[in-house]
Amino acid sequence: MTQQEYRTISQVKGPLVFVEETEEVAYGDIVEVETPEGDVKRGEVLESSKDTVVVQVYEETQGVGRDSKVRFLGESVKMPVTEDLLGRVLDGTGEPMDGGPEVIPEEERDIQGEAINPFSRELPEDFIQTGVSTIDVTNTLVKGQKLPIFSGSGLPHNELAKQVARQAEVNDTDEFAVVFAGMGITEDESREFIDEFRETGALERSVVFLNKADDPAPERIITPRLALTTAEFLAYEKDKDVLVILTDMTNYCNALREVSAAREEVPGRRGYPGYMYTDLANIYERAGMVEDSDGSVTQLPILTMVGDDITHPIPDLTGYITEGQIVVDRDLYNQGARPPVDVLPSLSRLMDNGIGEGYTREDHGDVADQLYALYAEGQSLRDLVSIVGEDALSEKDEKILEFTNEFEDRFVDQGSEEDRTIEESLGLSWELLSIVPQEELTKIDRETIEEHLGEEG
C-alpha cells in the first residue's frame, strides 16, 4: 500500500488524533503526524471506521492541530531484530540510547507477535536457578513459565529483579539471555538499572528497553511488545533461553486506562478498560517453549499493588493469566529481610515440572512441602502467643516457633549471601528442619529423614 497524506484532523484529545475523510486505513498501521513547524511525531492507528480514524501518538501531541499533516505509511509497527542487540540499551520505542553503533537488523518483526499454535507448544519444564532460596526451593521458576512478582510501593522489587537478572541460569551452566523492559520508571531507577547491568557484566547478555516516567504514556503500551518481539527472535531463531523482566506492569495498565479515557470508552473496574484482561493475556501468553526450537521465553513481570491490595484489578487479572506469583511482603521488609519474599501467599503452579530427580534433587518437593507446612503453623502460633503468651505453648510448639524465626532470619533473609545454589538452599532447609522433632516432619518419608538427619536419639 502506498503512503496516504491528509490534512483532515478534526480533533486532538490527549494522545489521540482524530482524522476524517480517509480511505483504506488498517488497524495498527504506522502513522506520521507532521506539525506546521516540521516536527514529525509517530503513532499507530488505534481505530478505523468509515468516517473517522483514531491515531494514537507515542509522543506529546503539543503543536498538533487541524493544519498538521497525517501520513499513513501502510505498514504495521515492526521491531528491527538482530543478535547484536545484546549489550545494548534502547528507549521505549526501540531506538538506541547508549551512544553505540547503528543497529543493522537481520529482519524486522511485527511487534504484535504471531500466535503460537497450541499443538506446537511444549510443556514448560526444567529448573531455573535464581540464587534466591524462597524462589528456588519453595516457589520454583521453570523454563518457559510466566511467574509475576507482586510487590508494593517502596518495596525492593527492582533489587530482586536485578538480582535474578544477573544470577539466573539453567542446568547449572547455561546463562539466560535477559530482555529487560522498564515502563514508567524514574530517571534514578533508569540510571540504577543501567549501572547495575554494566557493573555486574549482565549487560553483555542483555537487551534493555527503558521507557521513563516523563516519556509519553502511549509509548508505554508498545515497550513490552518491542521487548517480547526481541525475546522471541533470540529464543526461536537463535535458540537462546531468554528471561524477560517487565517492570512495572502497573504503569503499563495505567497507560491503558489513560488512552481508554481519552477515547471515552465505558470504564470497567476502577476505571480500567474492560479489555484489560485480553490485553494482558496478549503479553503474558507470549512466554513459553515451542517444538523444533531449543530456545525458550520465560517471563518475570513485576507489578506494584495499589495500596498493597492483591484484589486490585491488575494483580487480580494477572493472577488468572499467569502461573502463580512471588509476593514481596512489607512486614518482612520492615524486619530487615532481604529479599522480603513471603512464601505463604506465593505460588508456582509449574513447580513440579522443574524439580526432583534429573532437575534438582529427589527430596526437593517433600522438603518444600514441609517447610511450607511448618512455617504456616508457626505463623498461627505467633497469633496465639499474642493472645495467651508463650507460657501456654507446649515444647513442640516452642520448637516450631523457633523454626519459624530461624526460617525468616536465615532462609528468607539472605543478607550479603545473595547467590545460593540449589544445593546450598536445600542444605540450609535440612538444617532448619532439624530444629523440630522428627515426628513433626510428616511430609517427608522416614528413609529420607534418616538419610539427612540420622536417627533421632
Image (tube, grey):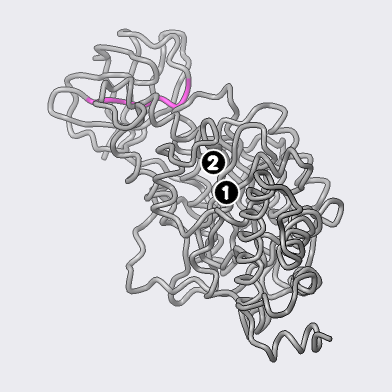
- Residue hosting label 2: 303
- Above or below — where is 256 with respect to 401? above
- Residue beneath the point at 77% across and 74% down: 430
Assign a secondary structure to mark 1: strand
Mark 1 is on which residue type? Ile
State the image coordinates of residue 300 (x, y, percent, origin top left). Answer: 57, 53
Decide if residue 7 is on the left or right side of residue 82: left
Of 71 and 316, nearer the camera is 316
Residue 331 visible? The answer is: yes
- Stretch of the chain drawn in magenta: 53-59
Q: Is residue 83 left or right of residue 412?
A: left
Residue highlighted by disc 1: 149
Badge 1: how crowded within 10 Å, few (<14), some, or many (20+)? many
Of the numbered discs 1 and 2, the one sitting upstream in the chain is: 1
Note whether 241 is above or below 321 in the view shown. Answer: below
> Mark 1 touching mark 2, by CB under 8 A?
yes
Q: Which quadrant is the N terminus positioned in?
A: top left
Considering the whole magenta stretch, tell me its main secondary structure: strand
Residue positioned most to the bottom: 447
